[in-house]
Amino acid sequence: VQLQASGGGLVQAGGSLRLSCQASAASGVYFTINAMGWYRQAPGKQRELVAATTSGGSTNYADSVKGRFTISRDNAKNTVYLQMNSLKPEDTGVYFCNAEATYTDYSGESVVTGKSDYWGQGTQVTVSS
């Protein structure tokens, strides 16, 4: 399973950005996304959870983004979005998409099933003051 993130950029404080992350897989691999989320890592800091959503639609947000960020999900497109409003300079960092997926791989000589955690490549968000 691969995750492709997009939507980062440079914005002034108070502005908005929308991040997208779509999951896909190679031919012969079928998957179900259980949970998806966004993490961020600021320079010199550890990666932290920003927002997450389950397949059932429940959501979880870091206290620092509650009321400003909204996570949503399009299950048909295997895509998760992060709408970021009222951005602050402290929101600056590399944002990573994460997904927990259950998969069935028919591409080899035997069928393989499992569950794993996947990460996207990261997208830079820079908020200027």
Image: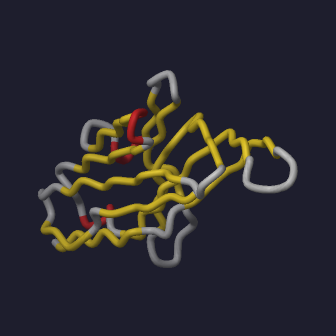
Relative to 105, 33 lies left or right: left
Q: Which residue lies furthest to the right in this view?
A: 110
**Residue located 62% across and 55% down the image:** 118
**Residue located 23% across and 69% down the image:** 127
Q: Position of residue 77 (x, y in %)?
A: 39, 41
Relative vertical location of residue 114 with respect to residue 24 in this rendering, above or below:
above
Relative vertical location of residue 70 with respect to residue 91 in this rendering, above or below:
above
**On the rendered image, what quadrant is the C terminus found in?**
bottom left
Q: Give 107 or 104, whichever is nearer the viewer.
A: 107
Q: In which quarter of the image is residue 42?
A: bottom left
Q: Position of residue 50 (x, y in %)?
A: 44, 49
Q: Residue furthest top?
A: 56
**On the rendered image, what quadrant is the N terminus found in?**
bottom right
**Residue located 52% across and 28% down the image:** 55
Q: Position of residue 114 (x, y in %)?
A: 78, 42
Relative to 16, 101 lies left or right: right
Relative to 80, 119 lies left or right: right
